[in-house]
Structures are given as structure tokens and as C-alpha cells.
Amino acid sequence: MIYSLNGKLIAKEPGLAVIECAGVGYACRTTDNTLAKLGTTDSNAFVYTYMHITQDDVALFGFADKTELGCFRMLLDVTGVGPKAALSILSDMDANTFALKVATGDHKALTKVKGIGPKMAQRIVLELKDKLAKGTGSVPSPAGGAVVTEVKGARGDAMEALMVLGYSREEAQQAIAPLDPALSVEELIKQALKSLASF
């Protein structure tokens, strides 16, 4: 299994980046968001990779960060969602936005993605929300005293979004707990991600 690639970007076109490592050019299918982060050809490039193996094909996918890779892997676990659909979704919106849409149950936003119909959009949201468990558990209060037994509203949505991005429930709880509950879901996610990046 190839975990990542670090080398020279020798070709770049819609949906594809070719990275040369030790004289070998690896063709990685990827998203528009990752392509935008890779820069120009002949520059150094780094991607996390996922190898998708089927009976008829072996394909390598590359992502600029673990967050996008995590969302891609979760999408592949959804019934009826293949690599092409997953790349379309993550090209149309970044991983954080996708996680927010799932956490808030906004399946209509996914129908704006080319090739994603209403039934598939609903299935994606339903299956991913189900995987995040029925409740959001408990999280210590900022003061470290009383424990909130159920996280609802913006904090609950932000926790679910972080879990869609691949963080564990415990990591999401630790990042959300000290934040101001009056913040919007988007701001909670943004601040929590900054905190998680420093762990």
C-alpha cells in the first residue's frame, strides 16, 4: 500500500496529477481542491494516497491533506458511491463544507454536485450520520466541572462534522469542550480544527 507521495509534479490536468518519485511517475486521480493546492508543474508536491483495487482496475488517488482523504474513504463506504462520485463531491466542496452538510443533514446541497441525485444525496447523509452513532455522547464543560450528557445544537453538529472528517469522538469532544457554545457551527469547526492541528 502506498501511503503518500513526495516528489516533483510533472503533469497536471483536470482530475489528475502526476508526481515523479525516484524516476517513477505516479498518476493520481484527485479533486479540484487538491489540484489547486499542488501549485505548478516542476514544483515539489506531496499527497496522501489511497489505492482503489477492483477486479478490472487499480487506481491511485491523491489528496493534499488527511482530512480530504478521510472524507473520500468515508464516501466510498456509502452504498452505491464509487470513486468518481466521491471525487465529484470533494471537488465541488472542500472537506470541511462536506462534513458540515452531513452533520446538519443538508442533503439538498449535495444534489448540486454533478452526478449526485436526490436519492444518492439522502443516502450519503443518512448512512454517514448513522455511522456517527445515535447520540453524540458526553463532553466535559469548559470549566472541567459538570458534564453535559448530551451535546445538541451547534456544538453537536460541530462534533459530528469533526467525526465525518475522521476525528474520533474523544478528539472531537476535547476540541469542542472549551469553545463558546454561542459560536456558529462553522466557527466552532474552524476553531476546533485549529486546536486539533496543534495536538
Image (cartoon, rainbow, N blue to C red):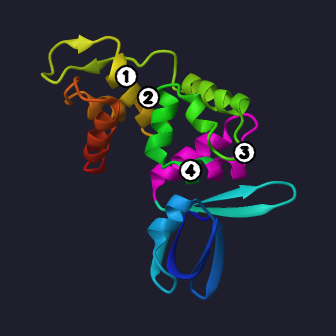
> Would residue 71 be found to the left or right of residue 136 on screen?
right
Where residue 8 appears, as percent x and y from the top left, is: 51, 83
Q: Residue at x 32, y 44 (%)?
A: 193
Rendering quarter of residue 3: bottom right
Circle 2: residue type: Glu
Circle 4: residue type: Asp
* Category of crowding for the residue at label 3, using alpha-carbon neighbours closer than 10 angstroms: few (below 14), some (14–19), many (at least 20): few
Residue 94 versus residue 131 in the image, above or below: below
Q: Which residues are magenta?
A: 65-88
Mark 3 vs 2, N-terminal side: 3
Determine contact: label 2, label 4, CB under 8 Å: no
The residue at which mark 1 appears reads as: 156
Determine contact: label 2, label 1, CB under 8 Å: yes
Question: Which secondary structure lies at badge 3?
Answer: loop
- C-alpha separation, residue under disc 1 versus residue under disc 4: 25 Å
- C-alpha separation, residue under disc 2 versus residue under disc 4: 21 Å
The residue at which mark 3 appears reads as: 115
Where residue 36 appears, as percent x and y from the top left, is: 48, 66
> Would residue 39 be found to the left or right of residue 26 on screen?
left
Where residue 90 appears, as percent x and y from the top left, is: 56, 50
The residue at which mark 2 appears reads as: 160
Circle 1: residue type: Gly
- C-alpha separation, residue under disc 2 versus residue under disc 1: 6 Å
Q: Which mark is residue 92?
A: 4
Farthest residue, direction left: 143
Instruction: Please name whichever residue, 45 or 98, is drawn nearer the observer in this view of the structure.
Output: 98
